[in-house]
Image (spheres, rainbow, N blue to C red):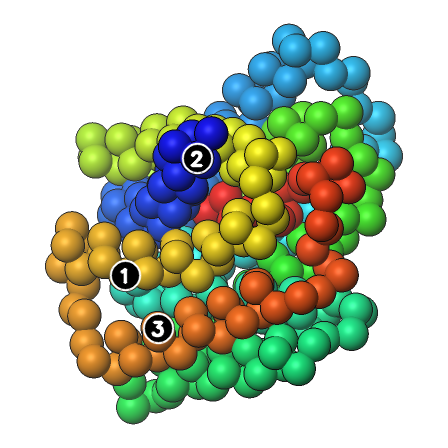
C-alpha cells in the first residue's frame, strides 16, 4: 500500500505540475481558449461516457446548472487565465502565481483560521508580491492570474455546497463539458476561431497529453489517494506542483531560472504549506466524510 500511495502521489505531483508546460506547448500554434475548449470537451466526453457506463444516473438540470457555475469558475476563469497569461509569461512563473489558490480558499472560506494559517497567508501573498513586482520583469499579465485564481477558488468552495453528482467522475465530466463549452464561446467571441489554421504536431500532442494524462490519469490517482491516505498528505500537491512546473519549464521550454524566481517560489510554497498543513475544520479527518469535488483538484 505504501508503494501504491507513493506512485499515486508521484503521478499527481509530476503530471499536474507538467500541465503548465503542456499548455505552453499547446498554445504555440493554437489560441488559448480554443485549445482548452478542445481539451476539456474531449476529456469531459470520455469521463461522462465512462461514468454512465459504470452505472451513474443521468444528471438533472439542477446538476447541470451547478456544473456550469463550477466549470465556468474553474476552467473559463482559472485555467483560461493560465493559458492566456502563458502567451506572455513563463509557465513556471504562472504556476507559482497559481499557487495562491489555497490562500484564496483560506480567505474566502468562513471557517476561523488558526494562527499558523494566518501566518501562511501573510507569507504566501508576500511571495506573490515579490514575484510580480514590476522590477522583477513580469508584467500585469501575471497579476491577472492572481485574480483569475480567485475565480478558481470561489468555484471550488461553491462545488462543496452544490448538489452532489452521482459520482466524482460524473461531476468532473459535467464540469469539464460546461467549462469547455464556455471556453469555446470565449474563443469565438474573441475571434480565435479565425486564427486556427494548421496546429503543429507538438500542439496536438500536448492536447492529447492534457486530456488523457492530465485530466484522466492524474485525476483518477487523486481520487484513489483521497480514499486511501490522509487528506493532509494528498494536499501536499499544492506546493509540489509549482516546483515541478518551474523545473520542467526550465529544462524543456528554455525558461530562465532566476534567483528572484527561486526566492519568490520558496516563499509562496512555504506559505501554501502552512495553509495546507495547518489544523483546520475545512479538511475532513475521515475519508468517508469527504465527497471529492473537482474544485479541490487543480486539473490544469
Residue at the disc numbered 3 = 265
Residue 41 position within the rendered picture, expressed as x and y whole percent measured from the top left: 53, 30
Residue 281 position within the rendered picture, expressed as x and y whole percent measured from the top left: 76, 61
Instruction: Classify mark 3: helix, strand or loop.
Output: helix
Residue visible at 28% across and 76% down? 261
Image depth: mark 2 or mark 3 in front: 2
Is the residue 172 above or below the residue 127 in the image? above
Q: Check disc 3: other Cα within 10 Å, few if <14, some if 14-19, many if 20+.
A: many
Residue visible at 31% across and 56% down? 245
Q: How far apart are marks 2 and 3 (CA)?
A: 29 Å
Report if the CB atoms under discs 1 and 3 are less than 8 Å apart.
yes
Q: Check disc 2: other Cα within 10 Å, few if <14, some if 14-19, many if 20+.
A: few
Disc nearer the start of the sequence (1/3): 1
Image depth: mark 2 or mark 1 in front: 2
Answer left or right for 160 relative to 40: right
Disc nearer the start of the sequence (2/1): 2
Residue visible at 26% across and 45% down? 25
Q: Is residue 120 visible?
A: yes
Disc nearer the start of the sequence (2/3): 2
Residue visible at 67% across and 31% down? 168
Residue 2's mark? 2
Q: Can residue 148 be seen in this view?
A: no
Is the residue 97 above or below the residue 9 in the image? below
Report if the CB atoms under discs 2 and 1 are less than 8 Å apart.
no
Q: How far apart are marks 1 and 3 (CA)?
A: 9 Å
Residue 8 position within the rendered picture, expressed as x and y whole percent measured from the top left: 43, 35
Query: Quick one: 37 or 146, which is closer to the camera?
Result: 146
Residue at the disc numbered 1 = 246
Report if the CB atoms under discs 2 and 3 are less than 8 Å apart.
no
Amino acid at each position: 500500500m505504501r508503494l501504491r500511495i507513493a506512485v499515486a502521489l508521484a503521478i499527481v505531483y509530476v503530471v499536474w505540475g507538467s500541465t503548465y508546460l503542456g499548455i505552453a506547448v499547446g498554445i504555440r500554434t493554437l489560441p488559448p481558449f480554443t485549445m482548452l475548449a478542445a481539451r476539456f470537451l474531449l476529456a469531459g466526453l470520455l469521463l461522462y461516457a465512462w461514468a454512465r457506463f459504470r452505472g451513474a444516473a443521468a444528471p438533472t438540470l439542477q446538476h447541470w446548472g451547478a456544473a456550469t457555475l463550477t466549470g465556468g469558475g474553474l476552467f473559463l476563469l482559472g485555467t483560461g487565465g493560465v493559458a492566456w497569461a502563458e502567451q506572455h509569461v513563463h509557465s513556471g512563473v504562472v504556476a507559482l502565481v497559481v499557487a495562491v489558490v489555497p490562500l484564496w480558499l483560506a480567505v474566502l472560506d468562513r471557517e476561523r483560521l488558526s494562527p499558523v494559517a494566518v501566518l501562511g497567508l501573510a507569507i504566501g501573498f508576500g511571495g506573490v508580491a515579490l514575484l510580480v513586482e514590476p522590477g522583477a520583469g513580469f508584467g500585469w499579465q501575471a497579476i491577472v492570474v492572481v485574480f483569475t485564481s480567485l475565480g478558481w477558488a470561489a468555484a471550488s468552495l461553491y462545488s462543496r455546497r452544490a448538489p452532489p453528482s452521482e459520482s466524482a467522475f460524473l461531476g468532473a465530466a459535467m464540469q469539464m463539458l460546461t467549462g469547455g463549452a464556455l471556453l469555446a464561446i470565449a474563443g469565438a467571441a474573441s475571434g480565435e476561431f479565425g486564427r486556427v489554421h494548421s496546429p503543429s504536431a507538438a500542439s496536438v500532442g500536448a492536447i492529447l497529453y492534457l486530456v488523457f494524462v492530465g485530466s484522466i490519469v492524474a485525476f483518477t490517482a487523486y481520487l484513489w489517494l483521497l480514499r486511501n491516505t490522509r487528506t493532509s498528505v494528498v494536499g501536499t500537491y499544492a506546493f509540489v506542483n509549482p516546483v515541478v512546473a518551474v523545473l520542467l519549464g526550465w529544462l524543456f521550454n528554455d525558461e530562465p531560472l532566476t534567483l528572484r524566481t527561486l526566492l519568490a517560489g520558496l516563499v509562496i510554497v512555504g506559505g501554501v504549506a502552512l495553509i495546507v498543513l495547518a489544523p483546520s475544520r475545512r479538511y475532513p479527518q475521515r475519508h468517508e466524510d469527504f465527497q471529492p469535488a473537482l474544485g479541490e483538484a487543480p486539473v490544469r
